[in-house]
């Protein structure tokens, strides 16, 4: 048995293809997508997943989210400076490397990531009733050697034997009937996740994939849409109350979480209620209670979505592939639920998109298939 693991910025998923069926390592809620969050309590073991996510509202300084973006980061990198500016938890950059500071001490990003891998491994073992030791990991297209090394080390720290890695867009492509297709076709994988955006142009010949072009933006994801909306809310509060809500770590994190929830609601509704109790310190009307309309949210997100489109178009230009040569565009990643993203894919890339049953689990599904079937991927 080989576990396909997608370590995501926002959510992580583990899957295995067993007896002709895809099985997911479900968390305590029965969900395959586990929040990539680790909480460090004063006493006891760290909490991972949904239990840790709930504690972001009350103790964000000791709750680590988005650790994937820190894996392999150099102390002087612009990515790390962005993380330091936007994270409620403390990140130090001493000579010994990047460290996350919590009430239980210092932790490297690799150590925190290993806790997520360990949680997924344990959930898989509960599901299958036996030890699960082999895994295929997925990696962003733009992952450098340091990121790859840190990710592999994190998995090995919890006893996983990593028998292979695959780029996230390629993994997403594998869950679209690859083993049943005969012939040749070109397609694009547009993978907009919580923390990274990846795009690949892929040529398929029977059950063989060849990646003609892989590109991405490692600092673009759904989390950035949340932050853009949160900053719009912060500007509104300043105009109305002359209070800077970004200065209070706890309240600011609550607002970001509420914006993420509003983004999800706006994927199916034309408006969403954004309510954060005690969000505005020092005022009588301390509660933040707003109705966010989809067009207003989309105006915050438009520039970020256009960034993804530029990257996708550049990949097509580099490979000299015209839109009409593509059989379709495979959507992967939770951010592709956003209607603005889907509209722009059709408008800019001029091809229909192919949507899996759950874009959030497509990457882990593909990795699991790769570990179970005779499929080849070449770069």
Image: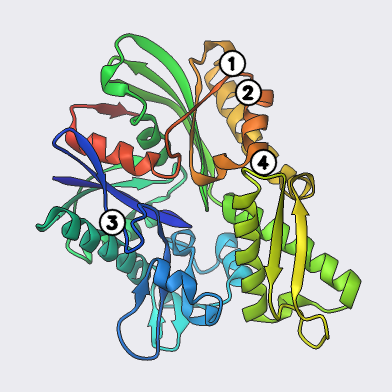
- Residue found at the very far left of the displayed protein: 130
Comparing marks 1 and 3, which lies closer to the viewer? Answer: 1
- Residue to which mark 2 is pinned: 349
Q: Residue at x 58, y 51 (%)?
A: 222
- Residue to which mark 4 is pinned: 305
Q: What element does badge 2 sit on? A: helix
Q: What element does badge 4 sit on? A: helix
Q: Earlier in the sequence, mark 1 or mark 4?
A: 4
Q: Earlier in the sequence, mark 1 or mark 3?
A: 3
Q: Position of residue 140 (x, y in %)?
A: 43, 45
The number of numbered discs placed on residues in the rendered structure image is 4
Distance CA(mark 2)–CA(mark 4): 13 Å
Q: Residues within 10 Å of mark 4 (few under 14, many from 20)?
A: many
Distance CA(mark 2)–CA(mark 3): 35 Å
Question: Could one spot residue 151 in this view of the protein?
Answer: yes
Which label number is shown at residue 323?
A: 1
Q: Earlier in the sequence, mark 2 or mark 4?
A: 4
Distance CA(mark 1)–CA(mark 3): 36 Å
Of 214 and 334, the residue lying toward us: 334
Color style of the picture: rainbow
Q: Residues within 10 Å of mark 1 (few under 14, many from 20)?
A: some
Comparing marks 3 and 4, which lies closer to the viewer? Answer: 4
């Amino acid at each position: 048995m080989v576990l396909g693991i997608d370590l995501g910025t926002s959510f992580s998923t583990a899957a295995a293809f067993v007896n002709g069926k895809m099985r997911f390592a479900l968390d305590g809620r029965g969900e395959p997508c586990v929040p990539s969050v680790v909480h460090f309590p004063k006493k006891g073991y760290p909490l991972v997943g949904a239990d840790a996510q709930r504690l972001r509202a009350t103790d964000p300084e000791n709750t680590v989210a988005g650790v994937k973006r820190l894996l392999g980061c150099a102390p002087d990198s612009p990515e790390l400076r962005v993380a330091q500016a936007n994270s409620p938890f403390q990140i130090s950059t001493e000579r010994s490397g990047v460290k996350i500071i919590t009430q239980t001490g210092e932790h490297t990003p690799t150590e925190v990531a290993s806790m997520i891998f360990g949680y997924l491994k344990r959930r898989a073992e509960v599901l299958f009733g036996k030890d699960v030791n082999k895994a295929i990991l997925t990696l962003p297209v733009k992952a450098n050697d340091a990121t790859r090394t840190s990710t592999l080390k994190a998995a090995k720290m919890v006893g996983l034997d990593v028998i292979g890695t695959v780029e996230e867009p390629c993994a997403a492509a594998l869950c679209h009937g690859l083993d049943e297709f005969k012939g040749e076709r070109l397609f694009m994988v547009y993978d907009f996740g919580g923390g990274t955006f990846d795009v690949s142009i892929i040529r398929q010949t029977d059950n063989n994939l060849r990646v003609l072009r892989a590109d991405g933006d490692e600092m673009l994801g759904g989390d950035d849409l949340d932050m853009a909306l949160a900053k719009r809310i912060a500007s509104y509060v300043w105009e109305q109350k002359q209070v800077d809500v970004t200065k209070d770590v706890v309240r600011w994190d609550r607002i970001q979480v509420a914006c993420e929830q509003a983004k999800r609601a706006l994927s199916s509704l034309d408006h969403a209620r954004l309510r954060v109790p005690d969000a505005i310190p020092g005022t009588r009307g301390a509660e933040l209670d707003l109705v966010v309309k989809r067009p207003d949210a989309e105006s915050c997100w438009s520039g970020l979505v256009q960034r993804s489109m530029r990257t996708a178009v550049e990949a097509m230009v580099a490979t000299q592939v015209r839109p009409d040569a593509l059989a379709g565009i495979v959507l992967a990643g939770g951010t592709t639920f956003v209607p603005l993203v889907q509209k722009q894919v059709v408008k800019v890339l001029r091809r229909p998109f192919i949507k899996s049953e759950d874009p959030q689990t497509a990457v882990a599904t593909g990795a699991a298939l790769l570990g179970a079937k005779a499929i080849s991927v070449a770069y």
